[in-house]
């Protein structure tokens, strides 16, 4: 998750005519397109459902024997995720569900998919497995970030340093700490396709969450970028935004952004706070300023982590200032006291 929202208009403009358009829930309609990725060299066995920024992308891999999905989006879009998958599978079952990490926008559709496909086997990174086993929404970050994720089960873990069969190909599992300590990325070495989750986007990477918990993780972000470079992917399917082939430029942009955060960690805190607010706006689309302030006061990352960062400023004032910045950057509008997602 944790989109850099200023990318949003650009990526919308880049999208061609969508091949699938589904708006069956109260959540905002999302579009997806795979045709342009195919032209860009994506193997035919792989379909990317490029979602809006609230949900992560979903990667469907179909082989002769079985079918696997990587990441399942946010819970308010779970019906859309299921519709996209079942439409693509045309009556065939989904056999495997793989989560790169357990942020709410990457596994929010797990429960719905598990209910729809009873024989589905779910694979998660090992780091948070015990918290899924005991279902601890605090340790899984859903409570601290003020987000939701319906409880799901898992069947096995994705051990870094091993491989997993997805469709007809073997995919390498690599540890990718930084954005999330326990995230993995997946690499298919024949076609050199990398599923990079939130470790690398076309223009940046996700919020470095361990930093919010006071655990330095900028070094881990750098090491993960080095691992990605060493894999020399021909195509990257990121957790958010369109797949891309210019990996060198993406790595340069990511390293520049990281450098800015290392030199000025307050900039990262500011970015993280705005991302969490924008995520809330994406989820509810519009709300009163007072309701957003109330949400922030009851959300631990705001009530404690960011409150320390905004020392000397009332939390309500800090939220209002952040909203003003969202409006200035075109990520929100205000009508009276009502905030609208853009
Ligand atoms: Zn994430």
Image (cartoon, grey):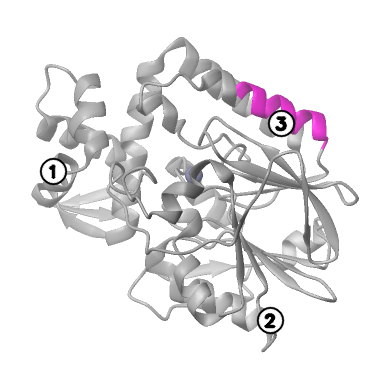
| Residue identified by numbered label 1 | 293
- Classify 270 as above or below 105: above
Which element carries disc 2, helix, strand or loop?
Answer: helix
Which one is nearer the viewer's eye here, 277 or 97? 97
User: Of callouts 1 and 2, which one flags the residue occurring earlier in the amino acid sequence?
Assistant: 2
User: Whole-percent x and y of residue 228?
Assistant: 73, 33
| Residue identified by numbered label 2 | 89
Which one is nearer the viewer's eye here, 247 or 294? 294
Q: What residue is at 72 percent from the left and 25 percent from the top?
A: 226
The region drawn magenta spans: 222-232
Residue 210 shows in this picture: yes
Rendering quarter of residue 283: bottom left
On-image quarter of the C terminus: bottom left
Label 1 beta carbon less than 8 Å to ligand 1 = no
Label 1 vs label 2, nearer the camera: 2
Q: Is residue 316 left or right of residue 24?
A: left
Q: CA distance from mark 1 to mark 2?
A: 43 Å
């Amino acid at each position: 998750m944790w989109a850099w929202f200023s990318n949003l208009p650009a990526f919308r403009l880049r999208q061609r005519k969508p091949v699938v358009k589904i708006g069956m829930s109260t959540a905002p309609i999302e579009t997806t397109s795979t045709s342009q990725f195919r032209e860009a060299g994506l193997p035919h066995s792989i379909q990317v459902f490029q979602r809006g920024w609230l949900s992560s992308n979903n990667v469907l891999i179909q082989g002769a024997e079985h079918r696997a999905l990587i990441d399942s989006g946010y819970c308010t879009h779970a019906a859309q995720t299921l519709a996209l998958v079942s439409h693509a599978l045309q009556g065939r079952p989904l056999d495997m569900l793989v989560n790169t990490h357990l942020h709410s926008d990457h596994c929010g559709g797990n429960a719905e998919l598990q209910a729809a496909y009873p024989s589905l086997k779910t694979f998660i990174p090992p780091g948070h497995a015990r918290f899924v086993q005991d279902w601890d929404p605090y340790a899984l970050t859903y409570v601290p970030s003020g987000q939701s994720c319906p409880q799901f089960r898992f069947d096995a873990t994705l051990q870094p340093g091993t491989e997993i069969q997805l469709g007809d190909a073997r995919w390498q599992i690599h540890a990718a700490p930084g954005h999330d300590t326990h995230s993995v990325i997946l690499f298919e070495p024949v076609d050199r396709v990398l599923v990079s989750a939130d470790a690398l986007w076309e223009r940046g990477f996700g919020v470095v969450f361990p930093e919010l918990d006071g655990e330095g993780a900028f070094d881990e972000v750098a090491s993960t970028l080095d691992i990605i470079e060493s894999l020399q992917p021909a195509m990257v399917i990121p957790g958010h935004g369109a797949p891309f082939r210019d990996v060198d430029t993406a790595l340069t942009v990511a390293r520049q952004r990281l450098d800015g955060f290392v030199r000025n960690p307050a900039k990262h805190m500011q970015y993280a706070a705005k991302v969490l607010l924008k995520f809330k706006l994406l989820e509810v689309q519009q709300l009163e300023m007072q309701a957003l302030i109330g949400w922030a006061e009851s959300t631990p990352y705001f009530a404690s982590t960011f409150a320390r960062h905004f020392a000397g400023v009332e939390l309500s004032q800090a939220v209002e200032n952040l909203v003003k910045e969202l409006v200035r950057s075109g990520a929100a509008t205000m009508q009276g006291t009502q905030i609208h997602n853009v």
